[in-house]
Amino acid sequence: MSTERMQEYLEAIYKREAQGGPVSTSSLAEDLKVTQPAVTDMLRSLESKGLIDYRPGKGATLTHQGNEKALEVVRRHRLWERFLVDVLGMDWDKVHEQACLLEHVTSPEMEEKMSALLGNVDTCPHGHSIPDKYGHVKKEAEVTALDKFEAGQKLYIQAIGKEDPELLHKINGLGLQLYSVVTIVKKENNGDVEIETAGERLKLEAGIASALLARPYSPQDSAPVQEIPLTNLKPGQTGIIRTCQGGRGRQGRCLSLGFTPGSRVKMLENFNFGPVLVKLHDTEVALGREMAEHVIVVLENNECR
């Protein structure tokens, strides 16, 4: 790619195209905060490079080459968001703009090392799939904006459709998280939606209700999740690392050894009152028991995942 701006356009077209159909100049102008004439100029430039098919008045679609380039940018962007949230502890409403800057200065080697450090996680903090290094994207369940469902429906919130910092901050303030199970109580004429979740009723502004992407609830969505110390895993069991408890020193040591949030860890040997031997990132690692007791992993239905 010749310019960072072109990468941003390809990324924006990819995200809009995923919602179906050619992408209009007006929607790109809104997403990228530029004028429509500026969008038109860039679309013509991208078409001349064989990266998009563009028909004035009908919109733009990515060519095969353009899609490959877009996936490269999307992968780096979402990996950085994950890193900033999981490793540096930044709030999810503050990472989008930082990731926009970092995605353009990330080498392939840095990208792969970051992915390995994160345990090759396949979703960003906002619930969207991270393409793998070959450009393959995990098939996502079909989702719809929450405000399109009817009162009485029980839903599973899977992703956030718009990575707007102010919007994400408001969602945080409501205490509403991804993978929550909610029931629509009432829909207002102005687009506001009242929901119930975990026994609490919340009033969602129209902008929030339209940005939350959900699907109908199924029983598997409420499978119990159990967090336990790594030392509680039995030989042969596998867990997903949630966090490393303790001060900065302990957390830093965990990260340096590869025990990062989202990583899969398999217990090989669990010696009583002694160290544990685990498999992490295809490498056998011995960890002192005191350290292992502060590594928290996630179990579901009594099975490690």
Image (cartoon, grey):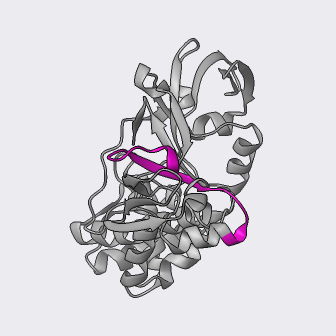
Image quadrant for the N terminus?
Answer: bottom left
Q: Residue at x 69, y 21 (%)?
A: 189
> Can you name the residue that lies furthest to the right here?
173
Q: Is residue 29 visible?
A: no
Q: Residue at x 59, y 66 (%)?
A: 87
Percent position (x, y) of residue 301?
43, 28
- Against 212, residue 13 (above or below) is below
Image check: 61 left or right of 190? left
Q: In the image shown, does 201 or 40 lie closer to the viewer? A: 201
Image check: 199 left or right of 100? right
Q: Residue at x 35, y 43 (%)?
A: 140
In the image, is residue 194 part of the stretch drawn in magenta? no
Percent position (x, y) of residue 212?
57, 38
Q: Residue at x 46, y 33 (%)?
A: 144
Image check: 201 left or right of 286? right
Image check: 299 left or right of 208? left
Percent position (x, y) of residue 172?
72, 44
Q: Is residue 302 visible?
A: yes
Image quadrant for the C terminus?
Answer: top left
- Over which residues does the magenta segment extend? 231-249
Percent position (x, y) of residue 295?
57, 55
Q: In the image shown, does 121 or 26 lie closer to the viewer? A: 121
